Amino acid sequence: MKGTNLGEFEELVLLTVGILYDNAYSVAIQHELNRQTDRKVSISSVHAAVYRLEEKGLLDSRMGEMSSERGGKRKRIFTISQSGKEALEKANELRNRMRAQIPNIALDHLG
């Protein structure tokens, strides 16, 4: 397994896979990211991220059922692995711990 440090986009993809649960395939991930982040996320960036996260051991995947709406093609469904859950928790704890160290006066200026 490669390093488990998460970039911002990787963290967003992991969170989105969690939100979509058993419907987390590339196009659905792209649409949900666009909706949640108000960004224009390309399908190629989603593909790169999910395969990178799978290589790191943070996502697992399986092939879904064949679908007539996709011409008999199967979707690759992604799920968060145990290591992925731990990486999300670690990232959240780090962010919260660092934010807690910002003096209240500085927070007032952050809005």
Image (cartoon, rainbow, N blue to C red):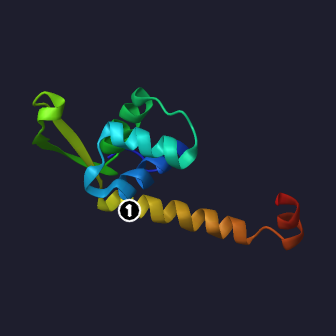
The number of numbered discs placed on residues in the rendered structure image is 1
Task: Using the rendered image of the protein, determine whether residue 36 is visible from the camera's viewpoint.
Answer: yes
Q: Residue furthest front?
A: 69
Using the rendered view, name the quadrant where residue 2 is placed. Answer: top left
81 left or right of 95? left
In the image, 61 versus 26, the foreground residue is 26
Residue 13, image x, y percentages: 43, 46
78 left or right of 49? left
Identity, as a three-letter code, of the amino acid under mark 1:
Lys
- Binning the other alpha carbons within 10 Å of mark 1 as few (below 14), some (14 to 19) or many (20 upward) gives some
Residue 75, image x, y percentages: 20, 38
Who's the residue at 46% across and 60% down the image?
88
> According to the image, label 1 marks what residue?
85
Q: Secondary structure at mark 1?
A: helix
Task: Using the rendered image of the protein, determine whether residue 5 is visible from the camera's viewpoint.
Answer: no
35 left or right of 19? right
Q: Is residue 64 above or below residue 98?
A: above
61 left or right of 12? left
Who's the residue at 40% across and 27% down the image?
44
Who's the residue at 13% across and 27% down the image?
71
Who's the residue at 39% across and 57% down the image?
19
In the image, 55 versus 23, the foreground residue is 23
- The C terminus lies in quadrant: bottom right
In the image, 52 versus 73, the foreground residue is 73
